[in-house]
């Protein structure tokens, strides 16, 4: 299972099959501002990274999160 | 089995009674004027009150049985005064789940389990703290919040048992008192004044105890102002997640604005600023005044805020009067008190923008926004354009961007843009400036999330300058 999808599924309490790189706060249930912060914490813990404010603000889809993490060399 | 077990609404008397019982007198739960200056916009029910009511209802209905070793509470959305909340009970494996809804919106989920994951009790000097008694919540900054520790005294067990008898029998009166203590810690101590409770995970434990609930911040994320707090006492060990909301937005003073505006640049403006008691309206009034213009600012409910803006302008040496104006009423009668013929009008009347929504289109919500953004603006323009006037209509980039929960708002603004185009075409006395404004930092937009927002002064200074040009005909 894709580890990033797993994090999103567990944090947002959603079926992982409903999530993909096109998932955004606008089209994904439970992805609101509070859960967005929990996602950041979960991602940072799972991948042992620290995300900058600018990176966090850019993460408007799972695909973008994946790109950010790839640039940091953890995916 | 899945069924609704109870319904209730919470009124002001219930709020005060809970505040007295818990010691949580945070003004977000009690004071309309304070709540209006938050993004939530209205007085909200204490989260722990909702929790204890849900537990009491489910327990009294015989839907909860011992042993309960842990509970996990997620506070998803606020509950406003006088709206009806419904609690339903589900069995989920060995756990029991309570879901509280307002209309179709899930606002709180409580999971009760016969087992518990370990929650460590921190070893800290906070154990030695004497309980604080506050009449006002602590107003803390980031440095303070990252190192909070202390204790609160538990509520009277007699009162707890009288108020929540079934829960007290089920889990123990001191644990009810401990849950009340959590409300007091979050609302009065840490984060305190600007707190927003997000979740509580608690284990029902056996411990040598006294009448205190101790707490310490174990983690604090400065990016989000998000605190994780451990609390223990009353035979309860809890992990609390809470945020510190942004405080009410402080806009620059007229004196500060004047440093960015050429003296007399707006001296020919007699500006009516509708919705000038705060936010974009407040800043616009200060910009016009700083440029030598005369301003009349209106308010619908924020008289004291409007007077404060006017006082600031006058203190600088500017000219400002205050008028009560409700865009939902007759403009002719209300604007008869104006005392001058405005040359410029800036329209910032708005209801609360960010709402708790189901995600489905809400026609009533659209009509409410349209009342302000279309009907109200049309009425004002009709009344004022008996003589030449330039008017500013603040639209929004939400008209062309997709933002969950803002469809009705964006639709009403789009309708307002069409109105402006037609008014411009058919009213010779009217010059309109319409701008799709970016997200601008005001009370309505200030959020715990990391979102870019422009300063109101940066947005409005060039617009007032453009309005000055429009008015010169």
Image (cartoon, coloured by chain):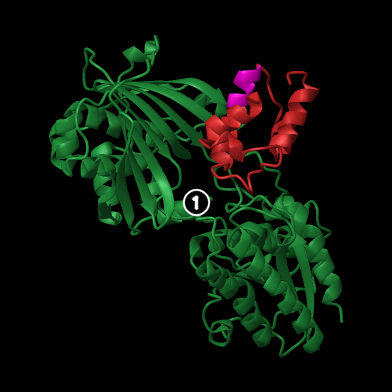
Chain colours: A red, B green
Query: Local crowd at mark 1 within 10 Å, few (<14), some, or many (≥20)?
Result: many
The quarter in which the C terminus of chain B is drawn is bottom right
The quarter in which the N terminus of chain B is drawn is top left
Q: Quadrant of residue B401?
A: bottom right
Q: So how many labels did they put on this image? A: 1
Residues shaded magenta: A42-47
Residue B392 is one of the magenta-drawn residues: no
Q: Is residue B322 left or right of residue B205?
A: right
Q: Nearer the viewer, residue B454 or B450?
A: B450
Chain of the residue on which disc 1 is drawn: B
> Compared to B420, does B361 lie above or below?
above
| SS for callout 1 | loop
Q: Which residue is mark 1?
A: B40
Where's residue B49, x and y in %? 30, 43
Where's residue B446, x and y in %? 60, 47
Where's residue B179, x and y in %? 29, 31
Q: Residue at x 23, y 32 (%)?
A: B176
Residue B264 seen in the figure: no
């Amino acid at each position: 299972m894709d580890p990033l999808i797993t994090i999103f599924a567990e944090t947002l309490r959603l079926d992982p099959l409903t999530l993909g790189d096109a998932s955004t706060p606008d089209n994904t249930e439970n992805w609101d501002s509070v859960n967005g912060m929990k996602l950041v914490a979960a991602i940072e813990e799972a991948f042992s990274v620290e995300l900058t404010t600018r990176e966090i603000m850019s993460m408007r889809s799972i695909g973008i999160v994946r790109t950010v993490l790839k640039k940091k060399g953890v995916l | 089995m899945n069924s609704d077990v109870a319904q209730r609404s919470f009124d002001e008397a219930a709020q005060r009674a809970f505040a007295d019982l818990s010691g949580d007198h945070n003004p977000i739960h009690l004071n309309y004027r304070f709540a209006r200056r938050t993004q939530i916009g209205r007085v909200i029910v204490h989260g722990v009150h909702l929790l204890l009511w849900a537990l009491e209802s489910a327990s009294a209905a015989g839907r909860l049985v011992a042993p309960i070793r842990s509970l996990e509470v997620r506070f998803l959305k606020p509950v406003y005064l006088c709206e009806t909340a419904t609690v339903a009970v589900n069995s989920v494996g060995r756990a029991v789940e309570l879901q509280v809804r307002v209309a179709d919106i899930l606002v709180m989920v409580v999971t009760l389990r016969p087992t518990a994951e370990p929650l460590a009790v921190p070893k800290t000097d906070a154990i030695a703290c004497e309980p604080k008694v506050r009449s006002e919540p602590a107003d803390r900054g980031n440095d303070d919040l990252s190192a909070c520790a202390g204790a609160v005294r538990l509520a009277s067990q007699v009162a707890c048992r009288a108020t929540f008898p079934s829960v007290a029998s089920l889990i123990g009166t001191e644990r009810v008192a401990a849950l009340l203590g959590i409300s007091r810690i979050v609302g009065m101590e840490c984060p305190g004044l600007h707190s927003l409770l997000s979740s509580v995970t608690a284990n029902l434990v056996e411990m040598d105890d006294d009448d205190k609930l101790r707490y310490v911040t174990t983690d604090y994320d400065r990016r989000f102002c998000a605190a994780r707090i451990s609390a223990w006492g009353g035979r309860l060990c809890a992990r609390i997640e809470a945020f510190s909301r942004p405080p009410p937005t402080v806009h620059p003073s007229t004196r500060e604005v004047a440093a960015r505006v050429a003296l007399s640049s707006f001296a020919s403006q007699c500006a009516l600023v509708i919705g000038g008691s705060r936010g974009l309206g407040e800043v616009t009034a200060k910009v016009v005044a700083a440029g030598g213009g005369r301003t009349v600012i209106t308010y619908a409910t924020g008289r004291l805020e409007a007077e404060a803006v006017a006082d600031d302008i006058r203190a600088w040496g500017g000219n400002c009067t205050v008028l009560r104006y409700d865009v939902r009423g007759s403009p002719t009668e209300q604007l008869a008190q104006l005392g001058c013929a405005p040359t410029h009008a800036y329209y910032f009347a708005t209801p609360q923008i960010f709402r708790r929504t189901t995600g489905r289109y809400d026609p009533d919500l659209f009509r409410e926004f349209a009342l302000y953004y279309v009907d109200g603006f049309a009425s004002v323009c009709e009344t004022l354009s008996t003589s030449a006037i330039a008017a500013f209509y603040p639209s929004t980039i939400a008209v062309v961007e997709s933002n969950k929960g803002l469809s009705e708002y964006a639709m009403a603004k789009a309708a307002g843009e069409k109105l402006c185009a037609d008014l411009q075409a058919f009213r010779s006395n009217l010059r309109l400036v319409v701008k799709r404004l970016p997200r601008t930092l005001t009370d309505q937009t200030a959020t715990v999330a990391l979102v870019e927002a422009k300063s109101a002064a940066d947005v409005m200074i060039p617009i007032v300058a453009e309005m000055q040009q429009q008015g010169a005909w």
